[in-house]
């Protein structure tokens, strides 16, 4: 694949995370990527094409992470190990929110842009399938729907942890990411963990 194209797609994701949907422009990507003005527009001639490229890049990154998880998960993974994954993922999303922020911006754009919607849909399906495989490997109940539900809950909680002020999170009992990750898992995957 074209290295410059990948650079521009990666940069578009970064610009989305830093500047939001309104800040994602061809010129902003050119500047952030350090390429001559007009380069991004040559690769992605419309805003829709630029957003779709960012969504596809994010989906590819998620699919690669899912593939790594699949190949690195031991055959004898325990329910407790799977349960511990969700608090760890929440900690990472809060500590390094760039990918989450870009994804949230793309979710908003997906409401009106079918190309973005398709890319995010592929990502959601890949996540749910990977979650279901992981749960089965650990002998846990549930299937793709349960894993998809857990993924959707996770996204909402992660956005809240990143977007809301600490005092509001404390007041409603959402200030402990580790506890929330474990509770999310227990809410969707019944049984002892």
Image (tube, helix red, strand yellow):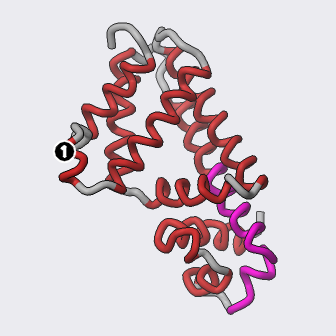
Q: Does residue 101 sit above or below 69 in this rendering?
A: below
Q: Does residue 40 sit above or below 121 in this rendering?
A: below
Our reading of the magenta stretch's main secondary structure is helix
110 or 130, nearer to the observer: 110
Residue shown at 47%/42% (left/top)?
A: 155
Whether residue 61 appears in magenta in the rendering, the answer is no
Q: Quadrant of the C terminus?
A: top left
Position of residue 96 measured from the top left corner of the image (x, y, whole percent) = 37, 57
Horizontal side, residue 31 vs residue 158: left or right: right
Residue shown at 49%/56% (left/top)?
A: 99
Q: Secondary structure at mark 1?
A: helix
Whether residue 57 appears in magenta in the rendering, the answer is yes
Q: Quadrant of the N terminus?
A: bottom right
Horizontal side, residue 49 vs residue 80: left or right: right
141 or 1, nearer to the observer: 141
80 or 94, nearer to the observer: 94
Count residues near mark 1 (Cα–Cα under 10 Å), then give few for <14, some for 14-19, many for 20+.
few
Q: Which residue is mark 1?
A: 170
Residue shown at 68%/53% (left/top)?
A: 111
Query: Looking at this rendering, what residue extends furthest in the bottom direction?
Result: 37
Residue shown at 53%/60% (left/top)?
A: 102
Q: Which residues are magenta?
A: 37-60
Position of residue 66 measured from the top left corner of the image (x, y, whole percent) = 57, 37
Position of residue 79 measured from the top left corner of the image (x, y, whole percent) = 38, 15
In the rendered image, which quarter is residue 87 located in? Answer: top left
Horizontal side, residue 184 vs residue 173: left or right: right
147 or 163, nearer to the observer: 163
Horizontal side, residue 166 vs residue 16: left or right: left
- The tally of labels here is 1
Q: Does residue 33 sit above or below 137 in this rendering?
A: below
């Amino acid at each position: 694949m074209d290295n410059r194209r990948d650079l521009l797609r990666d940069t578009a994701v970064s610009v989305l995370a830093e500047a939001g949907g309104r800040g994602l422009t061809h010129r902003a990507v050119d500047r952030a990527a350090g390429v001559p003005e007009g380069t991004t527009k040559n690769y992605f001639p419309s805003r829709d094409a630029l957003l779709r490229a960012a969504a596809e890049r994010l989906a590819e990154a998620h699919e690669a992470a899912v593939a790594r998880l699949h190949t690195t998960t031991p055959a004898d993974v325990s329910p407790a190990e799977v349960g511990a994954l969700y608090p760890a993922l929440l900690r990472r999303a809060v500590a390094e929110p760039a990918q989450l922020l870009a994804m949230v911006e793309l979710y908003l754009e997906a409401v009106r842009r079918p190309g973005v919607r398709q890319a995010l849909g592929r990502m959601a399906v890949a996540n749910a399938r990977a979650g279901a495989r992981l749960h089965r490997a650990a002998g846990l109940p549930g299937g793709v729907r349960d894993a998809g539900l857990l993924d959707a809950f996770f996204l909402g909680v992660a956005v809240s942890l990143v977007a809301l002020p600490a005092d509001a999170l404390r007041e409603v009992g959402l200030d402990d990411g580790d506890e929330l990750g474990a509770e999310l898992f227990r809410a969707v995957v019944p049984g002892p963990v």
